[in-house]
Image (spheres, rainbow, N blue to C red):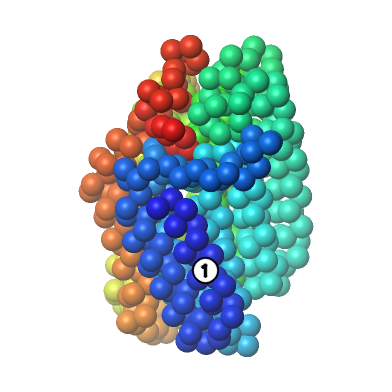
Amino acid sequence: MSFVTILIPLLGALLARLTRGRLAAAAAFASTVATFVAALFLPGAEAARFAWLPALGIELGFDPAGASWVLVTSAALAMIPAVLAAVRHGRGGDASGFLALLLIMQASLNGVFLASDLVLVYVFWEATLIPSLLMLGLYGRERRRGAVTKYLVYAVSGSFLMLASILALRPLSGAASYAFVDLLPAARSLDAVVQTWLFAGFAAAFAVKLPLFPLHSWLIDFHRENHPSGAADVAGTLYKVGGFGFFAWAIPLLPLGAQAFQPYLLALAAVSAVWGGLAATQQGDLKSMLAYMSLSHMGIIGVGVFSLTEAGMTGAMTLLAAQMLSTSGLFLLSGMLYARRHDFAFEAYGGLAKSAPALAGVTLLVLFAAIGVPGLSNFPGEFLALMGGFAASPGLGGLAVIGSVIAAGVYGVNTYQRLYQGKPHDRVPDLGPREVMILAPIVAGILWFGLAPAPQITSIDAATQVALTTDAASESPRSAPPLALGGER
């Protein structure tokens, strides 16, 4: 079942690229729905293992345990409206290429979340770079070339250091293979100095894709210059997987290295949260505001992960999954607003609630979810992540609150007022049937994570407990609770 959630979008991408028009749209939409249905069956599914390069200790291993199924399911739900929004936004009216890239991105991300072999994780990690670059480079806005160059430099630089750590980890630890269950006891037996150097290589790649301040500037240009429909921004939102890399691989495999880097990474995460939140309050256009808001969310996720506490790490992964829906929803709404005004500048808006009350209502709901209002998607994970941050460092936890609570309230209220309140410029159409179809999965997911978070939190918490167990001798791959990327074998 794990492999199916990778295979379906790949087949959908192939069908979408080989066809045109409505057939391509139908193939892409059917693929996203089928992937979501398959993701619903991941909890409790057995891990899948296939021989790949046995002489090198590399296998095709996939495991849906822990945080993996939560993230795959959330990403699958967010991708359904992204495909619907992308249908009419290709070159010359043909969206087949755009749709194919979205589906390849989904398959690659599912591979990152589900892979239980470290080399395989790297393969999927690099594979996600290709569709994200092509969507930005081929379908982005006027200044997309600079954004592509900056993004490529940041991503490739970090990935090379990560590859060096991966190649060194098995021979240094003496693990039987690159499979997580083989690496776990072997890597934890390494001395602190070796773990610290290896952790640094992973951190170089994961910090870029989290992202952490000051490695975040690619993110702002990425969202500003992506296609105005918001569909490519959804893929970019799902692509912020650095926190998952720390949670699922770097911290559990190299706990002594994580402890050595914790004070610095925790401080950078808190700065990212407050910097993103405060910068979001100062933006003059919707896309830039959403980019900085997303940075603030990633900072909170970092605070939770680097707290190295059970509540913080569990909350971070819960928030990562939840913000996939809320942030994706806001980017899709930005595309709908752009279709009405052909501009992202706030000064082009105002008073839209009078002629588009349904659009205003949904926007307010998704904004509330994004700023962490109780009962909606982001609140459970954000609360737990900040709780962990306070436990690790009251000062840095308090700093993160400035960005996550105070600044979020300011930019959330200001954004709604500038878009929908005040004197209207002219009338705009309210939500149409197609736009309702796009927003319905987002609203459903926001309510799901907000009102019924217990199954997700319970599954993620089992992975957190393994990540925080630093005594390698006390663990057995067969008896340990399932981690996000490695379960029983």
Does residue 129 show up?
Answer: yes
Residue placed most toward the observer, 389 or 451:
451
Locate residue 137, reporting x and y percent. 70, 68
Name the side, left or right, on which 310 lies relative to 444: right
Q: Quadrant of residue 418?
A: bottom left
Name the side, left or right, on which 45 lies relative to 289: left
Asked if 419 appears above or below 393 in the picture, the reply is: below
Residue at position x 60%, y 37% in the image = 118
Q: Amino acid at mark 1?
A: Leu
Locate residue 110, reporting x and y percent. 50, 52
Residue at position x 37%, y 80% in the image = 434
Locate residue 476, reporting x and y percent. 44, 20
Name the side, left or right, on which 1 lies relative to 178: left
Residue placed most toward the observer, 470 or 313:
470
Residue at position x 44%, y 80% in the image = 26
Q: Is the C terminus in the top left, top right, bottom left or bottom right quadrant?
A: top left
Residue receiving disc 1: 11
Residue at position x 70%, y 42% in the image = 159
